[in-house]
Image (cartoon, rainbow, N blue to C red):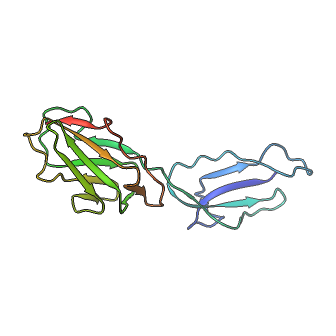
Amino acid sequence: GDWVKVVLNTASCSDSSSLLDQHLGPSDSDSTTEAYAAIVIRDEGTYRVCYKPGTQSDYVAVPGTFIISAIPGILSYNPAHGATEVTRKYISLQFNTGIRIKAGGKVWLNTSRQHHDTITLPNSQVTVRSSKILRIYPTGGLTTYEDSYEVIISPDAITGLTGLTWDGIPSGAYVFTM
């Protein structure tokens, strides 16, 4: 039967470190006009497909490549949502993938004492560190004068490195207390 494998775009089809080496289904009939293989790719990157007809001994590259990219999502909040007695000076959000700040997006910091800080991006108060960490430095820092903070980020503020969008943080989803 015919075989398919997926390799990183930088690898050759003869590379033994393929992600998948799969016999194509559903059958080996000569009259079959289509076939399938279940592929699970866990890492971001640019990939290509290599194909080996049942009568051949070597794989050949199928023209073109495809990109696997994660949709940005937050892995951790610091301070944590619902945290109390926070003593840090900035907010740090760790993402699952590399991110970029998008011009025109907004970050709102609202406090229980009715102070509102609106940051329009790009702005030095919002930075990306190590490609996956978003840091927000409120005007004057996080102060004990305020009882609690609510962080809102517009859906157009952050994208993944490949341009995939992020949903942002809606009102009420991220709150902590000093």
Q: How many marks?
A: 0
Q: Nearer the viewer, residue 9 or 174?
A: 174
The x and y percentages for residue 123 are 25, 62
Query: Outermost residue, left direction?
Result: 145
**Residue at x 26% of width, y 59% of height:** 127
In the picture, measured across the screen, residue 79 lies left or right of residue 133, that is left
Q: Is residue 157 above or below residue 75?
A: below
**Viewer-proximal residue, 26 or 107?**
107
- 23 to the left or right of 91: right
Q: Position of residue 138 (x, y in %)?
A: 17, 51
Nearest the eye: 115 or 12 = 115
Residue 71 or 26: which is nearer the viewer? 71
In the drawing, does residue 149 fall left or right of residue 131? left
State which quarter of the image contains the C terminus: top left
Residue 164's spot in the image, x, y percent?
48, 55
Residue drawn at 84 percent across, 44 percent down: 27
User: How far across and how far down the image is residue 57, in percent?
Assistant: 77, 62
